[in-house]
């Protein structure tokens, strides 16, 4: 069982890392995450078996896996908002939005959930 997960993680780790860095470079404050939601929806639409639902508001993202299966379901969620903080790092993927930064880890949460 562990080897199954290890091989899956190894196969997607670079993509998850790249997506986290993309989100990190383009942070948006709470209820303003329009572009972030678009980026996530676009990636989700590429995953076979997922149905991406139309947004209720521009900043939400909902996708359903195996929607026609009976029984209990599990909901997974991740926040995607950033904070009004100036990023003072020199990483290549640092925030391109002045005064806004993913200092809270939500970029990582969203990327891992997508993975």
Image: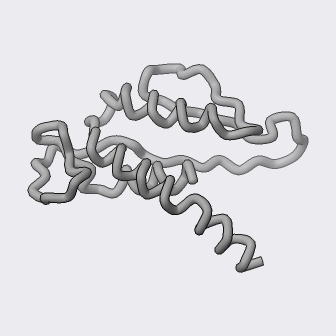
Q: Which residue is drawn at 53% across and 20% down?
A: 56
Find residue 47 and report its image quarter.
top right
- Residue 112 x, y percent position in the rendering: 51, 56
Give the residue at x 18% y 40%: 96
The total number of labels drawn is: 0
Give x and y (percent) for residue 25: 27, 44
The residue positioned 55% from the left and 52% from the top of the image is: 113
Figure check: 2 above or below 85: below
In the picture, the quarter occupied by the C terminus is bottom right
Relative image position of residue 106 (x, y in whole percent): 37, 51
Q: Quadrant of the N terminus?
A: bottom right
- For this rendering, which residue is in front, 106 or 40? 40
- The answer to whether residue 47 is left or right of residue 91 is right
Q: Is residue 54 left or right of residue 26?
A: right
x 67%, y 70%: residue: 7
Please say if 12 is above or below 23. Answer: below
Farthest right residue? Answer: 70
Does residue 30 sit above or below 101 in this rendering?
above
Q: In this view, does 53 lie to the left or right of 109?
A: right
Q: In this view, does 35 lie to the left or right of 78?
A: left
Q: How is the image coloured?
A: one colour
Question: Residue 110: horizontal and vertical position, in percent?
Answer: 46, 49
Determine the image quadrant of residue 52.
top right
């Amino acid at each position: 069982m562990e080897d199954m997960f290890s091989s899956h993680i190894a196969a997607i780790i670079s993509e998850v890392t790249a997506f986290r860095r993309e989100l990190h470079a383009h942070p948006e404050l709470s209820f303003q995450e329009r572009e972030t939601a678009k980026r996530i929806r676009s990636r989700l639409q590429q995953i076979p078996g997922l149905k991406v639902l139309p947004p209720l508001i521009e900043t939400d993202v909902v996708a359903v896996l195996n929607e026609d299966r009976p029984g209990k379901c599990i909901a997974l969620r991740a926040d995607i908002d950033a904070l009004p903080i100036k990023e003072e790092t020199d990483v290549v993927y640092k925030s391109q939005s002045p005064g806004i930064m993913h200092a809270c880890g939500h970029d990582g949460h969203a990327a891992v959930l997508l993975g």
